[in-house]
Image: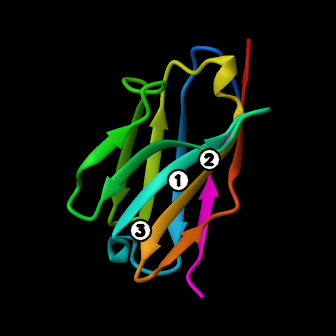
Amino acid sequence: QVQLTESGGGLVQAGGSLRLSCAASTSIFSFKSVGWYRQTPGNERELVATMTAGGSVSYADSMKGRVTISKSRAKNTVDLQMISLKPEDTGIYSCSGGLGNSVVRGQGTQVTVSS
């Protein structure tokens, strides 16, 4: 069973940065697309950023300019670099990817931004 495992979450002050990583148990380049999602308190799970197999990226308007999604062949990960973090960015960040006819989801990593 293919697994995705997130890491890199933690506590950061407002204005700070974090880099999240999502490691795959199979080649990350096998996925049709991969994305980062988040669930903030009291809100539905929302898309943060996605990258297709061809490398096309898209970002949520709320985070555009503050996040960058990328893949690392060396680490076999899809990473999310976040800057200028705000307290409202606090939540659980998880990765997800389309593989064949299935969607694989990770468990998530907590990001807490203090004011």
Residue at 63%, 54% (x, y): give it. 7
Query: Is residue 61 toward the left or the right of residue 9 in the image?
Result: left
Q: Earlier in the sequence, mark 3 or mark 2?
A: 2
User: What quarter of the picture does the N terminus occupy?
Assistant: bottom right
Colouring scheme applied when the structure was drawn: rainbow
Quick check: marks 1 and 2 in contact, CB under 8 Å? yes
Residue 21 disc label: 1
Location of mark 3 (residue): 76
Side of 18 relative to 110 (left or right): left
Looking at the rendered structure, the kind of residue marked 3 is: Asn
On the image, which quarter does residue 3 sit in?
Answer: bottom right
Residue position for label 2:
8
Vertically, is 91 above or below 106? above
Q: Quadrant of the C terminus?
A: top right
Task: Report if residue 13 is visible in the image.
Answer: no
Place of residue 42 in the rendered image (x, y in percent of width and height, measured from the top left):
79, 32
Q: Which residues are magenta?
A: 1-9
